[in-house]
Amino acid sequence: MIQKISLFLIAALFFSCRQQAKPVVSSEVPVIVPAFSADSAYHYIQGQVNFGPRVPNTNAHKACAEYLVASLQRFGAKVTEQKVKLTAFNGNTLDANNIIASFKPDEPQRILLFAHWDSRPWSDHDPDPRNHNKPVLGANDGASGVGVLLEIGRQIGLQSPHLGVDIIFFDAEDYGAPEDYRGNSTDSWCLGSQYWTKNPHVNAYRAKFGILLDMVGAKGAKFYREQVSDYYARNIVDRIWNTATNLGFDKYFINRSEGSITDDHLYVNQIAGIPSANIIQYDPQSEKGFGYYWHTVNDNMSNINKETLFAVGTTVMHVIYNEQ
Ligand code: AHN
Ligand code: ZN
């Protein structure tokens, strides 16, 4: 009798354990998304701005490239510098450098994250014409996207998502012809991404999707669904804006289509064929579409806000860590 009962107990225990084990092997295991540090992103923006304007062919530009490469290597990425001479609309030869960081370089399933790291040589939208020939410091226009991606790179190095990730810092995005330029200025923006999409750092490079961060650090920034992104990458735009809404960041991410912007993602979509979305500050009310300090001498650290950095960084982290 005792034997029979214990046999029954063992059997009951065995089956109950099997029952309990089920949810653990199901796909409902919650994904742990590492916390994005806005303090750290802010520090990386300050780190770039400390070099001064990162205009191609200047010492600040060279020194900042070294800082970016050393940072990405410290996070454990395989870093490729794509150094190339590019010709600007005005005939200037630019010593350009696309900086590419690969995490899990042998994993075929990949996500591409990108931002431009150069700053504009002319503050041609400054209200004071005497500033038009001065370079833009680019705390928001340039450094903010790079700073957020450096912090994401640091987190990936500590705990990787399932997929491989490439972070590309494109050069010579902001060397585009001023509005009053009289000569031919077709495709004068985004020279670094135009080059990379025709000459990727690895043969037949593929990624499931791409996300561009451009001007993502300003206080009170609003990010609308951008129309080039919606045309080529509606699913990924949906995923980003839904993720932001679920996280409570809907005051930053407005689920409405506004503006069609020539930016690095245009070439990544059209030439590389990687569906890519642009997270870019946009203000349909303002005259220029972007912040009032856009392409002025006032694009400095005083506009950079940690709450905005946190909303953007956290949203992108959730998108990439939830990708299976
Ligand atoms: C144009 O102004 C044509 N495109 C905006 C791309 C840009 C410039 N992003 C930052 N600076
Ligand atoms: Zn710019």
Image (cartoon, rainbow, N blue to C red):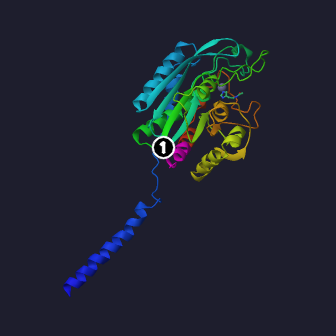
Q: Is residue 100 visible?
A: yes
Q: Is residue 65 above or below residue 148?
A: above
Residue at 42% x, 37% y: name it. 157
Residue range of the region highlighted in magenta in the rendering: 314-324
Q: Is residue 301 visible?
A: no
Say left or right for 192 vs 227.
left
Q: Is residue 319 above or below residue 143?
A: below
Please check the rendered image and state whether residue 229 is part of the magenta-colored stretch, yes or no: no
* Foreground residue among 139 and 77: 77
Element type where label 1 sits in the image = loop
Please check the rendered image and state whether residue 319 is part of the magenta-colored stretch, yes or no: yes
The residue that label 1 is drawn on is: 163
Report the label total: 1
* Foreground residue among 296 and 208: 208
Give amino acid for label 1.
Leu
Q: Give the x, y percent position of residue 272.
A: 62, 33
Picture quadrant of residue 281: top right
Q: Is residue 242 above or below residue 7?
A: above
Say left or right for 173 vs 258.
left
Residue at 64% x, 37% y: name it. 278
Q: Give the x, y percent position of residue 178.
A: 73, 19
Residue at 53% x, 35% y: name it. 148
Say left or right for 269 vs 148.
right
Q: Give the x, y percent position of residue 7.
A: 24, 80
In the image, farthest residue toward the front: 204
